[in-house]
Image: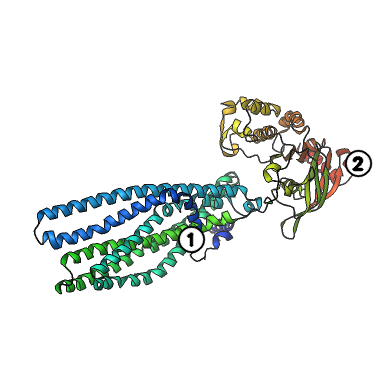
Amino acid sequence: MSAQSNKKTESAEATEQVKSRFVYQDDEDMDKGFDWVQVKRVGKYMRPYARQMVPIILVMMVVGAITKLLNPMLLAYAIDHAIKEKDSTQLLYIVAGMLGLYIVQWLANNYRIRYTNLIGQRVIYDLRDDLFSHVQQLSFRFFDKRPAGAILVRITNYVNSLQDLLTNGVVNLMIDCVQLIGIIAILLVYNWKLGLAIMVTVPIMFLVSTKVRLRIRRAWQVVQVRTSRINSHLNECIQGIKVTQAYAQEQANMDYFEEMNKDNHKAWNRASTLNQTFNPIIEVTGAIGYFILFLFGSYLVMRQEITVGILVAFGAYISQFWEPINRLGQMYSQMLIAMASSERIFEFIDEQPNVAERQSARPLPAIQGNIEFKGIEFEYEPGRHALKRIDLNVKAGSSIALVGHTGSGKSTIINLLCRFYDVTAGSIRIDGHDIRDVTLHSLRSQVGIVLQDTFIFSGTIRDNIRFGRLDATDEEVEAAAKAVRAHEFIVDLPQGYETEVQERGNVLSMGQRQLLSFARALLADPRVLILDEATASIDTETEVKIQEALQTLLAGRTSFIIAHRLSTIRHADEIVVLDHGEIKEQGNHEELIAKQGVYHGLIQAQYRFLQETG
């Protein structure tokens, strides 16, 4: 096999591996019928504004429809009377009347569009706000199963796809229905025979287009899925660009993106092509209607059952008749697109957090920090135990170090304490209060956490520190930074505390980001503080500088420390050694070393590693 063939094979295999990351079960479940429940749910967002604006919109709609229906009547009268009788004065009045009706119609439509846009934009605002607020409340399990891109596309693209429907579509639907009813009534009054003859084409058009509509719905749902996958892939690639470049996988990502882009292009072309099939159907049906009008209408004129003016008015009304029929077909397609989006939106809104407040939940009062883990068990997935029968009593103000191999359950204990997940069995109590019986905000506001992968928000250095307590003064922010030795590097930045940093703080070193997280935690002043590998990214020299700051940070607080460095854990009041979700040893540094057990083995392994790498 040639080198070029090998390269293609490797690229194809890499592309398949990338592709496997972007097949989501929730996006594959698309075969659902048109659900009027979704229409009602979207309608609920319009209800608060209905009383304010609907009367005005209805008046403008009726005025616009009436003025549009009156013009062909004036045209028929002009032909049958003013022109026939050669009465130029009467003809001038009729022309002026028709011009006046056009002006009134224009004004009514202008105001109607303005008010419907106002309602539509307010509804979109409320819907997006509700969706984002709800997503903020969802549990970690929700985010564990979905990539960020799939979430982003629902909050942005899917909500935007409802915009046209809400700003113009609903009102246009009502206008078209009123116009159709008015035209049918007028045609039957003018001559019921000719009116019925022309209406024969309507059921033909409806039967032919029904199957096309179903295919259109499916096609637009496929487009939504393809768009979601592209956004998910883009988000992951941008977030992981360093890893991609480090492993030279740019070509694999580009190959798969090209494949997704082609799929999306094909899906759009197919949906657009199907969408355009309505126009030929309407045009053919309209042509048949005109053919019937010409033959049968001419016959009725010769029999003097109708006048030439009425025949011309019939032609004008037929033009107006097929126009709303055409828009209704397009409106149906638009509704299918909107329903495909609303299904995805309301799936998220209907998602219930795995960790939810009980109805009887009460605020957790100011705590001292006595924590009890009693009979704790936890499974991330059924049958896969992460923790087994954990019993642990932590006194207020004491420091607990959690050590163990990767996957031993250290971070899981912290996640349960913060109620990012709920225990499978057992209970966690703070000062005697079961954390499931208190509100999430009152619990988490008294528990601070510093992670290894510190997230820095777009904004200034000062704003990132103030995120720990939004009402903190500038002096309090700077005092917190000084306490954790972050002030020195901050003042050396171009604008000091006002220096702008982008998402994830890429202009800062790992150590500097960690120092900011320490300042943020100190400013929040929690009674319980968690350090989850918080010093892992700090060099030895920097770590020496912040040991004193850590003592200040931990003083008087109940603290949990997850770390591998001996310097970070040896001074803890108690060290808990975990292995495969169970507590194997417990005691202070000297006691555990004397036991010559698991902890002693971990320390010896660390010493050997330092000697080999030092």
Q: Secondary structure at mark 1?
A: helix
Residue found farthest to the right: 594
Instruction: Kindly identify the residue that appears in the image at 62 percent across and 27 percent down.
Output: 474
Judge by depth and name the residue closer to the eye, 523 or 453.
Answer: 523
Horizontal and vertical percent position of residue 9:
56, 59
User: Residue 548: which disc?
Assistant: none
Residue identifier under label 2: 594
Judge by depth and name the residue closer to the eye, 214 or 236.
Answer: 214
Q: Amino acid at mark 2?
A: Ala
Q: Is 607 on the left or on the right of 116, as rendered?
A: right
Horizontal and vertical percent position of residue 353:
64, 53
**Colour scheme employed for the rendering of this structure:** rainbow
Q: Secondary structure at mark 2?
A: helix
Mark 1 neighbour density, 10 Å: few (under 14) some (14–19) many (20 or more): many
Q: Amino acid at mark 1?
A: Gln
Q: Quadrant of residue 559?
A: top right
Q: Is 333 on the left or on the right of 459, as rendered?
A: left
User: Residue 221: which disc?
Assistant: 1
CA gap, disc 2 to disc 1?
A: 65 Å
| Quadrant assignment for the N terminus | bottom right
Instruction: Kindly identify the residue that appears in the image at 51 percent across and 50 percent down.
Output: 127
Horizontal and vertical percent position of residue 466:
62, 33
Mark 2 neighbour density, 10 Å: few (under 14) some (14–19) many (20 or more): few
Q: Quadrant of residue 568?
A: top right
Q: Earlier in the sequence, mark 2 or mark 1?
A: 1
Instruction: Kindly identify the residue that appears in the image at 86 percent across and 44 percent down.
Output: 586
Answer yes or no: is residue 456 visible.
yes
Is 588 rendered above or below residue 339? Answer: above
Is 225 rendered above or below residue 238? Answer: below
